[in-house]
Image (cartoon, helix red, strand yellow):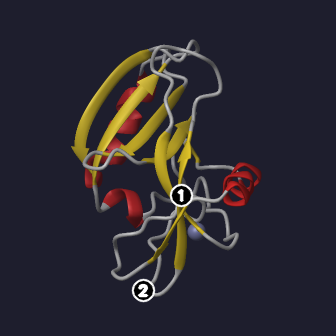
Amino acid sequence: MALDYTLAPISPDTADVLRAGGGERYIADTNPGYPCRQCLLDAEVGEVLLLVSHDPFTIDSPYRARSPIFLHEQPCTPAATSARLPEQLTSRQLSVRAFDGNAMMVDAAVIDGADLDALLQRFFDDSSTVEVHVHNATRGCWATSVVR
Ligand SMILES: [Zn+2]
C-alpha cells in the first residue's frame, strides 16, 4: 500500500556535495546505529560513513538550522519515497515537526516511530502544513523531510 504522503530525503546531488566537503569518518561497528540519510538504511557493520551537517530548510525562518546526518561515504541508492516507511524511521524515537509555507512551525510531537504514519496523516490533515521534518529524538539528527 502506497503512503499518503511523499518522503523527501536528502537529494543525491546535495549528498554528493556534502561528501565532497568531507566530514567525520565512521566505520559502522553495530547495526542498527549508523542511519544513512540517502538510502534510509542503517549501515551494515564495516560500512564507512561520513558525519556531516545538513540544512533541510529551503527558505529562512527562525527555525532554520543545520542538523548532523550520516551518509554512506560512497554514493548509495536513494530511498524509495512513496512505498513504505523505512524501518530506520519506524524503529526509533522521533521528534516530528510540521511547517507551513513560511517555514514556521505548525505542530510538533515526540513519538515512537511505530506511530509515525498516523502522526504524518494527522499533521497533513491541517491544510497549513506543507512540509514535515523528522528527526531522531535523542541525538537530533535530521532523518528526512516529508511532503504531501
Ligand atoms: Zn546510504
What residue did someone put label 1 on? 37
Dot 2 falls on a residue whose secondary structure is loop
Above or below — where is 90 with respect to 111? Answer: below
Q: Earlier in the sequence, mark 2 or mark 1?
A: 1
Q: Is residue 4 visible?
A: no
Q: Residue at x 30, y 46 (%)?
A: 94
Mark 2, residue position = 45
Q: Residue at x 31, y 27 (%)?
A: 108
* Residue type beneath disc 1: Arg
Residue 9's disc is none
Camera sees residue 124 = yes
Question: What's the amino acid at mark 2?
Answer: Val
Where residue 116 sits: x, y (%)? 33, 46
Classify the position of ligand 1 by quadrant: top left, top right, bottom left or bottom right: bottom right
Mark nearer the viewer, 2 or 1: 2
Q: Nearer the viewer, residue 44 or 127?
A: 44
Residue 45 in picture, x, y percent from top left: 42, 86
Q: Residue at 39% across / 66% down in the picture?
A: 87
Q: Is residue 17 left or right of residue 98?
A: right
